[in-house]
Amino acid sequence: MGTVIVGSGTALPELEVSNDQLAEVMDTSDEWIRSRSGVHMRRYSDPGTGSATLGAQAVLAAIADAGISPDEVDLLISATMTPDLLAPGNAPLIQHQANLGPIAAFDIRQQCAGFLYGLELADAMLSSGRATTAVVVGAEAHAGYLPFGPSVWGRLRGEHANPVSDADYQQATKYRAWSVLFGDGAGAMVLRRDPDPTRGFLGGRLFSDGSLFDLIWVEGVGFRHQPYVDQTQLDAEMHLPSMNGMELFRQAVRLMPDSVAAVADEHGLRVNDLDLVLAHQANERIIAAMRKQFGFDDGEDRVPCNIAHHGNTTAATLPLLYQDLRDESRIVPGQLLSFTAFGAGAHWGANLYRVP
Ligand SMILES: CC(C)(COP(=O)(O)OP(=O)(O)OC[C@H]1O[C@@H](n2cnc3c(N)ncnc32)[C@H](O)[C@@H]1OP(=O)(O)O)[C@@H](O)C(=O)NCCC(=O)NCCS
């Protein structure tokens, strides 16, 4: 028996924002963002529509795609860095909004590696008989993190065409190194056991190294502070992410390819046996470096990149990429895939999937 993907679905917010629009509200340019990251545009969720709502929409789309009814699902794993609430997690909110039964539902916190961890956990729960139909969902609403003032949001949402205030412009510019990279969205997969053990998830390796915790992190609004949030933290902007972009880049281009090669090796395979590597989408240049390291120079795009249209959607990049490839008929039976990711924590890893 193997665990296979029997359905997938996504949900994207309506508001689409181009690099040129961002260049109207901060000191940046389409040229800088495209050449440094490959992002052309991203979507932002509306106030009041958090990651749980996007996640529930993606879950329902995946369930419909699988051709099953919501009450057949008995496990929900939710991966997000931007939950609706500090407590409880997104899983019960998604379970309720998607009309699932009173099932096992929990959140995991592996940021950009969240969906990969979710796939591995779901496979383990299904193969041990603890569940029969699992849904893994990655959903993010980064818009809440963005240091954009009211005049910036008003302009991006098309509510006015005036220049933004000086203070809002300076504030948005201060955080431009990471704010231009991220986008919102959700993706989900339905997983079940398949009688054929030669197909589906073949195995995976997950890693964590907490010594890298501050490569990208949010220092404030946590319970080592008493009270956990106060004006001092807000004035110091400790509720906003801090990122060491260059070091993250350096680690990602090393650890994702290494884990793909390690998991392939463990299964007596070579990286060259892989038809597609579905990698976390943080930067087009990271993807290009991976293609080079793998020696994929056969002209085929074996490490696909869809960051241009979505930006970095953290836990949602892998299911969004899978769905885009499916829509382009690029996922076909018999292919050998590897999912790989690297994210804040740091957490990373890779697995292997034989398409049924
Ligand atoms: C963030 C990232 C795109 C930055 O690319 P980079 O080539 O390292 O750029 P730098 O940070 O060195 O900045 C270069 C210059 O561009 C400027 N810059 C930064 N953001 C900018 C923006 N949005 N627009 C214009 N200029 C910008 C910097 O101020 C710097 O200017 P300076 O040389 O005058 O000081 C890149 O490091 C990256 O993608 N890292 C990985 C990020 C990641 O994976 N994050 C998710 C975690 S899973």
Image (spheres, rainbow, N blue to C red):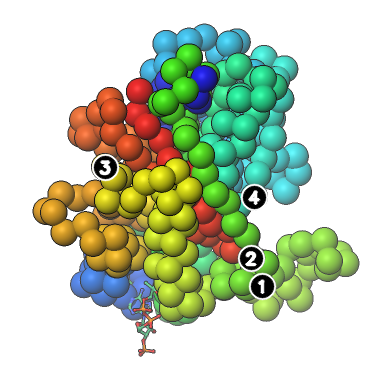
Residue beneath the point at 72% across and 48% down: 86
Q: Is residue 326 left or right of residue 102?
A: left
Residue 33 picture location, percent across and down:
29, 69
Report how far apart the C-alphas of labels 1 and 2 lie in the structure: 5 Å
Residue beneath the point at 44% across and 78% down: 246
Report how far apart the C-alphas of labels 3 and 1 lie in the structure: 34 Å
Q: Are marks 1 and 2 in contact (CB under 8 Å)?
A: yes
> What amino acid is found at the position of numbered circle 1 in the picture?
Ser
- Does label 3 or label 1 sit earlier along the sequence? 1
Kind of element beneath mark 2: loop
Disc 4 packing (10 Å; few <14; some 14–19; many ≥20)? many
Report how far apart the C-alphas of labels 4 and 3 lie in the structure: 29 Å
Kind of element beneath mark 3: loop
Q: Is residue 178 left or right of residue 35?
A: right
Disc 1: which residue: 211
Q: Are marks 4 and 1 in contact (CB under 8 Å)?
A: no
- Does label 2 or label 3 sit earlier along the sequence? 2
Report how far apart the C-alphas of labels 2 and 4 lie in the structure: 14 Å
Disc 2: which residue: 209
Residue 267 picture location, percent across and down:
45, 43
- Does label 2 or label 4 sit earlier along the sequence? 4
Which dot marks residue 275? 3
Q: Nearer the viewer, residue 166 or 298?
A: 298
Which dot marks residue 109? 4
Residue 119 in view here: yes
Report how far apart the C-alphas of labels 2 and 3 lie in the structure: 29 Å
The quarter of the rendered structure image containing the C terminus is top left
Quarter of the picture for ligand 1? bottom left
Which circle, 2 or 4, is nearer the viewer?
2
Vertical relation: 101 (above or below) 331: above
